[in-house]
Image (spheres, grey):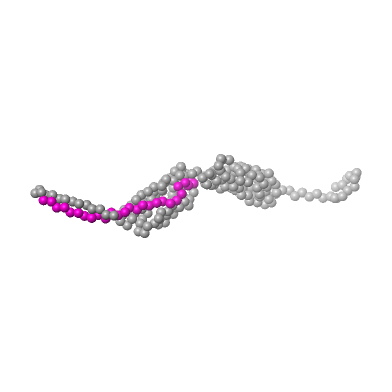
Amino acid sequence: DSGAITLTETNNEGCDTTVQEAIHIEQKPAPLISGKDTVCEYRGSYSYTTSGEPGHTYTWRVYNGTITHTAYDSITVSWRGVDSGAITLTETNNEGCDTTIQEAIEIVPTPKPSIKGPDTACEYKGGYVFTAPSKAGHSYSWVISNGSITDGAGTDSITVRWQGADSGHVQLTETSEQNCDTTIGKAIYLKQTPEPKISGPDSLCEYTGNYT
């Protein structure tokens, strides 16, 4: 695009001169930010990109988050534990014209689960119950090492039967409606069960005592 400036200068005698200068109007950049605008607190690896133009420069700023990686036309962000954040991008072209845009970010709390249940158990025994605080709309995924879930899989309360090993482990991943998740674990000490044996005759006479 182009424009022009016209100047007319008039002296005391009423003589005037008019000059004109052509102006080249350089188009300003029109950047766009691509990436998630709803994120989980305390999570990294959220990538934000813009369409890189040759010769252009890009300046990123993040509010309530930390830039963990920067490339030519992209960044990776870890968001903090607050309700909202923002990303600001300034794109500057070869002629020094720049445009700044901002994108608001909603930061969603991550679950904070806990596991309630015994720290010790007997090997080859069942009926051990582990629970997590129930929250509406949240999902629960359990993983058991050296044991198996006998009841309640996929809920906030499970029943476990342990196998024969020195230790076991209960792992819980709680996921919110916004798909934010937290994984925790609990170590279990597995106690050895007795192995009794009975020695004595396996046949006897009726109405007769004193068998040992």
The answer to whether residue 46 is left or right of residue 140 is: left
Q: Nearer the viewer, residue 2 or 190?
A: 2
The answer to whether residue 141 is left or right of residue 209 is: left
- Magenta stretch bounds: 15-41
Q: Is residue 3 above or below residue 151?
A: below
- Which residue corresponds to the image point at 36% horizontal and 55% vertical from the top-left? 57
Furthest residue in direction left, as rendered: 13
- Which residue corresponds to the image point at 65% horizontal and 47% vertical from the top-left? 149
Residue 184 seen in this snapshot:
no
Residue 191 location (% of width, % of height): 68, 48
Residue 17 is covered by the magenta coloring = yes
Q: Nearer the viewer, residue 123 or 50?
A: 50
- Which residue corresponds to the image point at 85% horizontal and 50% vertical from the top-left? 202
Residue 199 is covered by the magenta coloring = no
| Residue 137: quarter of image | top right
Q: Is residue 45 above or below residue 138?
A: below
Image quarter where the N terminus lies is bottom left
- Which residue corresponds to the image point at 77% horizontal and 49% vertical from the top-left? 196
Residue 26 location (% of width, % of height): 30, 54
Q: Is residue 53 above or below residue 150?
A: below
| Residue 74: quarter of image | bottom left
Residue 178 seen in this snapshot:
yes
Residue 66 location (% of width, % of height): 43, 49
The answer to whether residue 136 is left or right of residue 59 is: right
The answer to whether residue 164 is left or right of residue 24 is: right
Report the number of numbered marks.
Answer: 0
Residue 42 location (% of width, % of height): 49, 47
Q: Nearer the viewer, residue 124 or 57?
A: 57
